[in-house]
Amino acid sequence: MLEASLDLLQVMVQRLLDGQMTLRDDIHDMRSRLTSLKRAVLASRRDQASDAERVAHVQEQMDRLTDRIARIERRLEIAG
């Protein structure tokens, strides 16, 4: 009877250890996925910053062209 109880206890302990190992593997996998996700988010943020920089540059060029056009229009009115 005692031997059967010890065997049952040993089986239960082994199941707990196996479950713990599975959890450890799952946590390792989740950490790897989280790291990949963080890298993807950072890459996306870099792309957004680069796009914002390009938009600002284009807006600056448009402002300069608008100023040039306004100056040309004023000169043409004087000459006309």
Image (cartoon, rainbow, N blue to C red):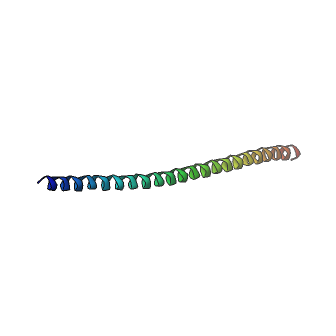
Is residue 71 or residue 33 the one in the foreground? 33
The answer to whether residue 44 is left or right of residue 27 is right
In this picture, residue 79 sits left or right of residue 14: right
Identify the residue shown where x is 65% and y is 50%: 50
Q: Residue at x 40, y 55 (%)?
A: 25
Where does the image place residue 69, in percent across and percent down from the top left? 78, 47
Q: Is residue 58 rendered to the left or right of residue 22?
A: right
Instruction: Give the quadrant of the N terminus.
Output: bottom left
- Residue situated in front as seen by the camera: 37 or 22: 22
Nearest to the observer: residue 1 or residue 15: 1
- Depth check: 71 or 49 in front? 49
What percent of the width, then of the height, locates residue 63?
73, 45
Q: Quadrant of residue 3?
A: bottom left
State which quadrant residue 77 falls in. Answer: top right
Q: How many marks?
A: 0
In this picture, is 64 found above or below 1?
Answer: above
Residue 12 drawn at (x, y percent): 23, 53
Q: Position of residue 39 (x, y in %)?
A: 55, 52
Q: Residue at x 46, y 55 (%)?
A: 33
Residue name at image x 51 percent, y 54 percent? 36
Q: Looking at the image, which residue sits at the far right?
A: 79
